[in-house]
Image (cartoon, helix red, strand yellow):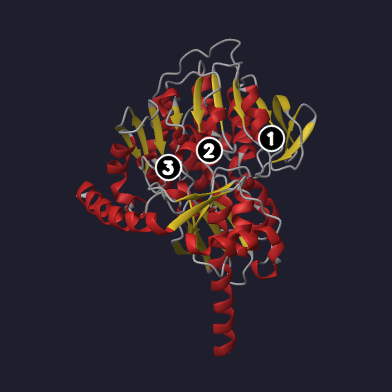
Amino acid sequence: MLPIDVLDVQLICQTTISGVNMMIAGTMPIKSMDLVKGKAKIIGNKISVDNKEFPISMGTGALISTAIKVHEYFGEDLPTVITAGDVGEGSGSLKIYEQLRKAESDLLVIHYIKPKVSEIKKIDFSPKIVADAGGMYVAKAAGIGDKFHLFLPDVGELAFLADEKASHPAYVRGFISEVDDREVPKLIEMAYKNNMPEHMVVKGETDYVVKNGKILESINSPKIETMECIGGTGDTLTGIISSLINYGYKTEEACILGCKANRLLGELSNPTPRTQVDELINQIPRALKALNL
Amino acid sequence: MVFKKIASIFKKDDKAENEKMDKNGLIIFKNVKDAMKSEKILKNYNISVVAPPPEIREGCDLAIEYDLVEETGIKRELRRNDIEPLKFIPLNDYSLKPLELVKIKKLDDDCLMVRCGNMKITIDKEGNILNISGGGCPDVPYLTLTLKGRNILEVPDEETPKELGYTLCAYTLNKAFEEAKRLVKNMQSFDESTS
């Protein structure tokens, strides 16, 4: 049973920007794979880019497949992907950073990438840039969060954004990392004392949609606790919101709708701790339909 | 309230930091993998893993803080293991330590989620790895693909996050992994002793 409030959303969709395509940049967990660039599509249970196939697991793969599903739902041109193999040593990440020095789209999503402060400073900041995962870590570590359009931290990552000394979520000082979930508004206030993007979504038990440090809306229904342990549920949120922005929704509207849609993925999947993210991704059309999009 | 708490902790931190600066140094490595390997090699020394100084930090780096008195032995140990650090420097006041606090959450179906920092690993009571979530560095999806579906007690040492990973996300995942493994072992010995 879907809650009434999510069925009652009335939002105005702006016209899609003609000819402008969303670009997703992030690594794939495949050793020694060279740079791959092209339109992404789903074939069976794999993502295909430029005739190369990738798994729909957590990480950039989950984000890409989510974005494809949302674009397909709206009948939009599919997103472009820049990816390279990287299992953590950093070679693929460097190839991606190099590609980002010249903008090729109006909306860029930077996802799983090895943080390199010296490299992120060299990218072209003319597009709207959504940063999640490593893309967000490096933007904060470099102190240039205000050059970005949207960050999507969970509560632990918000603590990292709030700690002006931390260069990675693993370095958040104890007195901040132990702040209770109920103190998220205080952490948001602390984060915005540093350089932060105009928009932020803090994902967690309650999702907070933030603009310029001010909480516009908090969303906590439906509440599916099991989602926290399923790898990739944050990636699906980023994929939905970015795609809605690309489709033409105002960012704050896209964030609110995205949080609701992502929670619906959980409700529709009825997940257990064993559930994998692809099961949730398959529910995207139903979730978007339930929101009257 | 939160800010007062922060201010008081800063004062305590300052005193402790000054004392450490007199006696400790930092080992700077080419990459996180060397740092993680060195932590294991130097386990019998008085060391801790910390963030490198901001001027050389790239966002995902590890350094090792050590007692200057032990420098000779540490250098010899690393040399024997073919690790060549970039440099050994006196400790400055920017020392930040990676999170080590591990939290455990009980889930449905007798499953446990073990969290360290931004990384979470979910296991059932037999020790099967059901899910890995969190993180943002490129080795996280790789480690997930490598570990998911396996039994945590059957993962050999050379395939743990600490051995396969390169980043701080792998470092914190390894802390969660080790705790999850310990919990499964304890649960199994508890079950055996009560059966």
User: Which mark's residue is nearer the viewer, 2 or 1?
Assistant: 2
Rendering coords of residue B94 (x, y %): 40, 46
Query: Is B59 placed above or below B124 here?
Result: above
Label 1 sits on residue: A92
Q: Is residue A216 left or right of residue B95?
A: left
Label 3 sits on residue: A203
Rendering coords of residue A17 (x, y %): 54, 12
Outermost residue to the right = A51
Q: Is residue A55 left or right of residue A161?
A: right
| Same chain, labels 2 and 1 | no
**Residue at image location 57% in from the left, 36% down from the top:** A284
CA gap between label 2 and label 1 equals 16 Å
Query: Is A258 placed above or below B128 here?
Result: above
User: Which mark's residue is nearer the viewer, 1 or 3?
Assistant: 1
Q: For numbered disc 3, what is the local secondary structure?
A: loop
The local crowd at label 2, few if under 14, some if 14 to 19, many if 20 or more residues have their Cα within 10 Å, is many
Tell me which chain the residue with mark 2 is part of: B
**Residue type indicated by callout 3:** Lys
The local crowd at label 1, few if under 14, some if 14 to 19, many if 20 or more residues have their Cα within 10 Å, is many
The disc at residue A54 is none
Rendering coords of residue A58 (x, y %): 61, 45
Upstream in sequence: badge 1 or badge 3: 1
Q: For numbered disc 1, what is the local secondary structure?
A: helix
Label 2 sits on residue: B58
Q: For numbered disc 2, what is the local secondary structure?
A: loop
User: Which mark's residue is nearer the viewer, 2 or 3?
Assistant: 2
| Same chain, labels 1 and 3 | yes
Query: Is B19 placed above or below A291 here?
Result: below
